[in-house]
Amino acid sequence: RKEVEQDPGPFNVPEGATVAFNCTYSNSASQSFFWYRQDCRKEPKLLMSVYSSGNEDGRFTAQLNRASQYISLLIRDSKLSDSATYLCVVAVGGSQGNLIFGKGTKLSVKP
Amino acid sequence: DTAVSQTPKYLVTQMGNDKSIKCEQNLGHDTMYWYKQDSKKFLKIMFSYNNKELIINETVPNRFSPKSPDKAHLNLHINSLELGDSAVYFCASSPNPWDRLNEQFFGPGTRLTVL
C-alpha cells in the first residue's frame, strides 16, 4: 500500500462547480497534514494545513479523519485559476521535517 | 526577491558526466531539503540538512552527494549520471523541521535531462 494515495484525476469541472479531492495515508503515526498546490512546470506551494477539527480558508475546506486515515479538500465556486495539481502531504510523526507527498490530483476548471 | 533559488534551471548532459545543482535561500531558515520529482510526477525527499548537518538521508544512490557550506546553501552533486536520474530536482527550506505545522518553501526546480 502506498504511503499517501490520491485519485490522480484529471477532474474536469466547469467554473463555479464544487469539487472534492480525497486522500488516504497508511502511517497511523502521522502527525501533520497539508494540501500543497503545484501549477504546471512550477514548484509546489502550501495551500493549507489540515487540522483535526477541520478548517476553512475562503473557498477551500480541509477535513481530517484520523480514524479512517483520510483527508479531504473541498473547493467551492471553482475558478479558472484553481486549475493545478493538488498534492496531499503527510508529515511522519517524530521525523525531522520528513514530508510524504501523494502523487497529486489534477484539476482542470473550464469556462 | 527570490526566496529559494536554484541554478541551473535546465541541465542537459550525457550519461556518465558529473554535474552540480546549487540552491540558496534568503529566508533565514535553518533547514534545507532536496526532492526529486520523476516523470510520473511523484515528489520524493532525498536529503535534509539542519544548520549544515545532515538529518534525513533517504535511500538514494551514493552517486548523489549533498553539500551544505552554510545554512543558506545546499548544493547537490551527482556523479556518473544515469538515464534514470532524469527528473526535476527541487530544493526547499523551512524554519524548523520539528515544528509540526512547518511550511516548506520550494525553489523553482532544476529540470535535469540525461541523454
Image (spheres, helix red, strand yellow):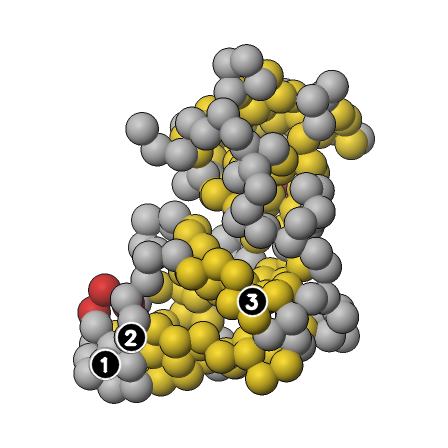
Mark 3 and mark 2 lie on one chain; the one further toward the N terminus is 3
Mark 1 and mark 3 lie on one chain; the one further toward the N terminus is 3
Q: Residue at x 48, y 43 (%)?
A: A100
> Which disc is residue A32 wearing?
none
Return the x and y of residue A103 as percentages of the image width and height: 42, 41
Examine the rendering and report whether any part of residue A85 can be seen.
Answer: no
The subunit letter for the residue under badge 2 reads B
* Callout in the foreground (1, 3): 3
Mark 1 and mark 2 lie on one chain; the one further toward the N terminus is 2
Q: Residue at x 77, y 26 (%)?
A: A56
Q: Residue under circle 3?
A: B49
Q: Residue at x 56, y 24 (%)?
A: A71
Q: Would you place residue A98 above or below residue A60 in this image?
A: below
* Callout in the foreground (1, 2): 2
Q: Type of residue at label 3?
A: Tyr
Q: Check if mark 1's residue and mark 2's residue have beta carbons within 8 Å.
A: yes
Q: Residue under circle 1?
A: B80
> Which disc is residue B63 wearing?
2
Observer-nearest residue: A50 or B114?
Answer: A50
CA neighbours of label 2 inside 10 A, class few (<14), some (14 to 19), many (20+)? few
